[in-house]
Image (cartoon, rainbow, N blue to C red):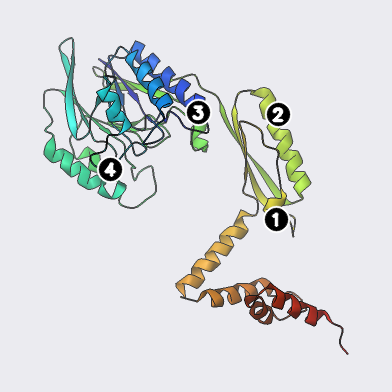
Amino acid sequence: MKVAVIADTHVGYPRFYEDSFTQAEAAFRDADEKADIILFLGDLYDTRVPSLQILGRTISFFRSIKKPIYAIHGNHERRSKGALNPVGLLEKAGAINHLNFSSAIFEKDGEKIFIAGMGNVPDDLAKAGLEKLKGTIQIPQAHLSILMLHQSVSEFVFGENLLSMDDMERLGYDLVLNGHIHARKEAPGFLIPGSTVITQLTKEETQPRGYYLYDTNERKHEFIPIPCRKFLLEELEFRDAKPSEVQEKAGELSARLRRENPEAIIRIILKGTLEKGIRVSDVVFAGEVGTFMDNKLNEHMFRADLKAIREMREKKLSMREMGEARMRKKMEGKASLFEPLELFEALANGAEEGMAYLQGRMKPAQ
């Protein structure tokens, strides 16, 4: 038997709205031809309450798919207890089968597979969720058993109180499938197909989009790419650069990439430092559809500022004491016409008093 595994289509995603539909549809149509059953791992929609237009288009599309679809809901679709989520709505429309702390058996030509699903729960409740699942569902020993999840996993995502692969392995399923993580990952008995649409513009998302096709007889999987727009990510490094230099080099790179890949999504990361006295906001780019300039110039300065503020907070300084300490630090080793703390005191009483202080300091000595 062939099992298609698709995840995180995020239909209706605003930034790449049409891509979210066309690439989701490409994955499901291809799976409909190649697989006997389709398993979907959550975040079909990008929002908990999709518009009628989005719902209508997806319901119509899923009714055209011939192979059975079993799905769980993701964190983008999770709603409060008792409220119908959009994946459950699709089930009521007769388009899919929604599994949540529930299971099903699928049979074809005498072969059976057991499928259990747990829709997304908050990370801090995920381990308790697995315990509930374990107490609710018994795994038949005679069938291939598959568990569908949509959770953060500590081996791939940084965070506290996350599920680990050991937690999932202890449940005893032959194959664990997980959504939520948008980059493709795999390990023995564990598959994450990644998203079918680019959402986070990360380096990992430059890899092909697609789905897994799992062969139950050979217990092997194959990644099936789908047609999608290219995503190109480039970095430019600068040192003490003028705004004109940054704009020129970034513009040249953007134009070249666009000529070579007219339909691509392009992200250019600007790193390094600007000329002394130049602010990051002084570097401005004309907006171009499908091109994203990520200005990380002088980022080390922001990090240093945040670190200093964090250290001051740990010392439990008041806001006034923090401000005084920051001004002293800024003025260290610099010639000045004024005393930093005197200026701070004047500014604390208003801009007019601060200006009066500076004007007084600038008067020539009698």
Q: Which of disc 2 and disc 3 is earlier in sequence?
A: 3
Q: What residue type is labelled 1?
A: Arg
Rendered residue at 17%/24% (across/down): 104
Lateral position of residue 257 relative to residue 195, left or right: right
Q: What secondary structure is marked by label 4?
A: loop
| Residue 260 horizontal side relative to residue 171, left or right | right
Instruction: Name the amino acid, label 3.
Output: Tyr
Please name the residue that numbered disc 1 is placed on: 279
Disc 2 to disc 1: CB gap under 8 Å: no
Give the structural element (helix, strand or loop) at label 3. helix
Evaluate whether residue 331 shows in this view: yes
Secondary structure category for the residue under label 1: loop
Quarter where residue 121 is shown: top left
Q: Which of marks 1 and 3 is nearer the N terminus?
A: 3
Residue 303 figure quarter: bottom right
Q: Position of residue 56 (x, y in %)?
A: 39, 21
Task: Compare marks 1 and 4 and give the one earlier in the sequence.
Answer: 4
Instruction: Kindly identify which residue carries mark 2.
Output: 256
Question: Residue shown at 30%/34% (left/top)?
Answer: 85
